[in-house]
Image: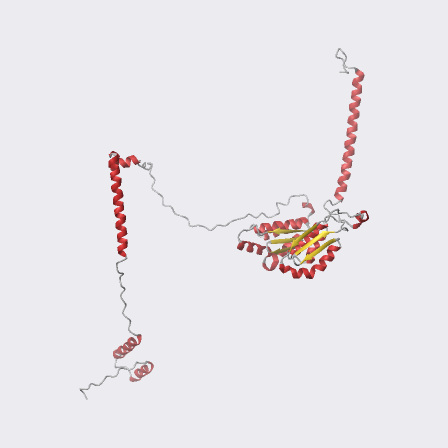
Amino acid sequence: NAEYMGGGHPIPEMGKRKQQDETTSTEEAQTETAEGEQQQDEEDQQAEDVDQWKVLPITPDDVDIEKGPLLLEESAFATLFPQYREKYLRQVWPEVTKALKSHHIACELDLVEGSMSVKTTRKTFDPFIIFKARDCIKLLARSVPYQQALKVLNDDTVCDIIKIGNLVSNKEKFIKRRQRLLGPNGQTLKAIELLTECYVLVQGSTVAAIGNFKGIRMVRRIAEDCMRNTHPVYHIKELMIRRELEKDPLLKNESWDRFLPKFKKRNVKSKKAAQIREKKEYTPFPPAQTPRKEDIAMESGEFFLSKKEKVTKEKEAKATQQAEASLRKQQQRQQQYIAPVEKKEKPKPTPKSDNTAEVIRKIKSQTPQTQSSGSISAAEDYIALPPLPKKKKSKTAE
């Protein structure tokens, strides 16, 4: 090293110079950090005043059209629409054309193919307006009124078409859950629109939403959760609480989890009848061991038979089984020739009119003679007796 001589002793002048250089470098670093912090504070103050999420609009004054078109290539989008929307679109198309013309976007309605198309022109100054126009014609195809669909052309308004048809496989469940979004007389849908500040339309298997970014994100969450069997009322309650918490400036930088409701999903299952099991008597001894095949053969005596004897025994058992089976089949065939048992006919009951007449005559014969004649005559007036059969005169009497 240059600082040390041959004996290893440092040169004093060189050491002083090194210390001076170190002090100057630290002073410069401190001044630079102080200037950097001051500059950062100024930038932070400017950032607080400026809304970084604000969408800056593009006007024709920002673009010099005399130098040439801003867009080098033509962009175009097209979408189909159902047949039942044809009549409405024909009435409304002049208003749509007028709104798109103000943004220098050309549009076309093809009634033969059933499609709408938009494309840029040489005067188009906003490069993102073509995507806004595409969303506009998509909403018109999804049965959204043109007054609401044209709001998408504004810079602070966006749209979202939520597909809910593939979230539920069962059609009946899908119709019931879609009805939950609407609610009785559309009250649930109106509450969602007021809390999210968005226009919401439920049509077929889609939900169209028009509004700001925050509201549209909430509408998507509500629609998807509704199809997953979570009622929209829970989200409406949460939104109402959030709306009240936003008014309090003290809770601006705090967590709101302790105020928001937490709903647990509960699947209530039907209670099954409790099965009463009979208690077995306790025995300290284990169950008996199952016998082996050899043990069973030894008990029956087959274990000690020769191979020939075993074969003959198997043949005899097989023959007896065949004989029993043939005998059963013969009995089944013979049952077809046995005559069925005839049912005995029940005797026909006697007519009721004869029985009543006999009963009335018995009652009259059993009546005591002490009764007055007036009471008997009065009872006879109300009792209608059938006429008695006339006796034929014998020829001998003549």
Tell me residue 362's x, y (percent): 26, 77
Residue 284 x/y as whole percent: 33, 36
Residue 103 position in % (x across, y down) = 75, 53
Left or right placement of residue 270 versus residue 348 in this view: right
- What residue is shown at x 79% (from left), y 27% (from top)? 27
Q: Is residue 321 above or below residue 99?
A: above
**Depth check, front residue: 324 or 112:** 112
For the C terminus, the quadrant is bottom left
Dividing the picture into quarters, in which one does residue 25 lie?
top right
Task: Say which quadrant the N terminus sits in.
Answer: top right
Q: Residue at x 76, y 38 (%)?
A: 41
| Above or below, comparing residue 285 to residue 14 in the picture | below
Q: Is residue 387 above or below residue 71?
A: below
Relative depth, front residue between 391 and 128: 128
Q: Position of residue 286 (x, y in %)?
A: 33, 36
Q: Can residue 99 be seen in the rendering of this structure?
A: yes
> Seen from this angle, which residue lies furthest right?
66
Taking the image as drawn, is residue 210 in sight? no
Q: Please give left or right for residue 186 compared with residue 268 in the image.
A: right
Q: How many marks?
A: 0
Frontmost residue, 345 versus 129: 129
